[in-house]
Image (cartoon, grey):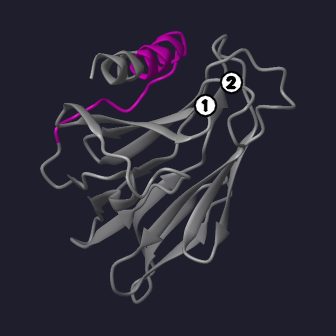
Amino acid sequence: MRHARDEVTTAVEAATRVLSISGRSEPPEFENPDVSWGELASEGVWAPTRDGQRVHIGVAGAAAEDRLASVIRPSLRVFLGLETETDVIGQTTTAGVRFITVLHGPGAPEEFRFPLRLGEGLSLDPTPSGGYDVVHDRYGATVGRFYSPWGYDSLYRAIPAEYHLEGTTIVMTVRHRDADALYPVLADPHYAR
């Protein structure tokens, strides 16, 4: 038990250290009653859209099927060891969720998968910035957004990150191995309604 608690602390401290020197506005953590997390990483999270529907965002990984969340508080949870040298911190925000992906070393993969289930009549449209809008097909209105991903190392140097779709799965690629990165590296898929 103590070992798992130490690993959770390490993941959260790594993320906090990098985010604290970012100098940019981060979405605030917030206990949002419209967001519902599953217990396992593979169960992911249900987040609201502006039209009253919900988007399901899963977290895939080698260990996602049986990886329980370590719940720090209702708005913050850690999924340890989802991939080699990789933890994912799930954070509830005022308008949605973010998945702070913590890569602890060069053995971490470069691709991360987030399977989606969209509400009825919703689809994804790519944005010029590299994110995806969740669009209501009938009205053409944007009811949610996956903001373009970013990656930074522990010196807050930019690490190339981008999305692409594989069916209904958003795949985030973080090119940390070719970037001469100082670990940990953080990447941030972020969804908001």
> Can you identify the residue that label 2 sits on?
105
- Residue range corresponding to the magenta coloring: 10-31
Q: Residue 117: horizontal and vertical position, in percent?
A: 41, 74
Going by the picture, which residue comes out furthest to the right? 178
Q: Amino acid at mark 1?
A: Glu
Q: Residue at left 16%, top 37%?
A: 74
> Can you identify the residue that label 1 sits on?
85
Is residue 14 a member of the stretch shown in magenta?
yes
Q: Quadrant of residue 34?
A: bottom left
Q: Quadrant of residue 86?
A: top right
Q: Determine whether 127 is above or below 158 in the image.
A: below
Badge 2 local density, few (<14 within 10 Å), some, or many (20+)? some
Q: Quadrant of residue 156?
A: top right
Q: Determine whether 141 is above or below 3 in the image.
A: below
Q: Amino acid at mark 2?
A: Gly
Separation of marks 1 and 2 at Cα, in angstroms: 6 Å
Q: Residue 85: horizontal and vertical position, in percent?
A: 60, 31
Which quarter shows the N terminus? Answer: top left
- The kind of secondary structure element at disc 2 is loop
